[in-house]
Image (tube, grey):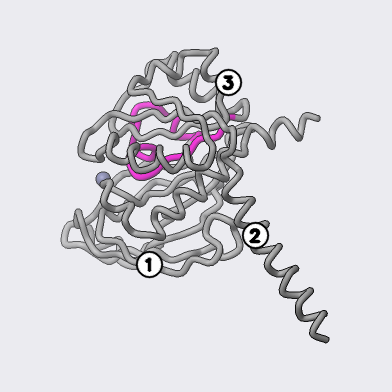
Amino acid sequence: MKRLVRLLVAVCMMCAFGQVLAQTTSLEGKKVLFVYGGWEGHEPRQCMEILKPWLESQGANVVLSSSLDSYTDEALMSSLDLIIQTWTMGHLTAGQESGLTKAVRGGVGLAGWHGGLGDAFRGNTEYQFMVGGQWVAHPGGIIDYKVDIKDKKDPVTKGLKSFHMKSEQYYMHVDPSVKVLATTTFHSQPESPWIEGVVMPVVWKKHYGKGRVFYSSLCHSASDFSVDEALEIMKRGIAWAALSRQQAKEKEE
Ligand SMILES: [Zn+2]
């Protein structure tokens, strides 16, 4: 009996270790283009400086870029596993947009958060089609709000419980085809009383061609990443999106 218990404990430990290993090694050897810039209010550099050391600690090879022209560099784009972008209120030229969307369609993952992905290029509809949503308002500005985990089985949100943010609660126009992992419920504001009770996606994943796209509307500023759940969701979402090209290749074989 004792032997059986020991065996069961060993199996459980191996399973737990395997899960952690799967999460921590998915970035090993992956080439990541980290594009940061745009509106300074979202602290693109500070946010990049939080995530880059973690990416490197996971074995990723991070290429930094503060220019959207990186999207027109075909040799670079075709060498990537993942693009992380934090660039608010910019504009993509036709060449930049087609370079980016072509890469993701072909199997490069894309991950980002808040306005850096979800309010990046208001005039670029193909880009928005790829991301799966576009910011339109943050009623009340910086407020206390709750994030509810909608999908408790998905690896990105598994094991996490509802949590609170003091930040911008993003009201978005969202593509109904996205897989929603977490939501938030709005309360009416003096300027927008009709939003009372609206349940809005906060975290989602989707596909665009062969590419995996991950988005979280959390983290208006770099300090918002100090909320453990917000940072953990971002890390897990990045790890999921980074497996995009690998999965695409495996399907071809
Ligand atoms: Zn913001």
Q: Which residue is mark 2?
A: 17
**Residue drawn at the location 38% of the way across and 60% of the way down:** 228
Q: Secondary structure at mark 3?
A: loop
Nearer the observer: mark 3 or 1; the answer is 3
Q: Which residue is mark 1?
A: 163
Q: Is residue 120 magenta?
A: yes
In depth, the one of 58 and 155 nearer the eye is 58
User: Which span is picked out in magenta?
Assistant: 108-130
* Sequence-earlier tag: 3 or 1: 3
Nearer the observer: mark 2 or 3; the answer is 2
- Relative to 80, is 159 above or below? below
Q: Secondary structure at mark 1?
A: strand
Mark 2 surroundings: few (<14), some (14-19) or many (≥20) residues within 10 A: few
Measure how far apart labels 2 and 3 are at the Cα level. Answer: 31 Å
* Sequence-earlier tag: 2 or 3: 2
- Relative to 157, is 132 above or below? above
For the question of whether residue 126 can be seen, the reply is: no
* Sequence-earlier tag: 1 or 2: 2
Mark 1 surroundings: few (<14), some (14-19) or many (≥20) residues within 10 A: some
> Whereabouts is ligand 1, in terms of quadrant?
top left
In depth, the one of 10 and 26 nearer the eye is 10
Q: Amino acid at mark 3?
A: Ser
Q: Amino acid at mark 1?
A: Phe
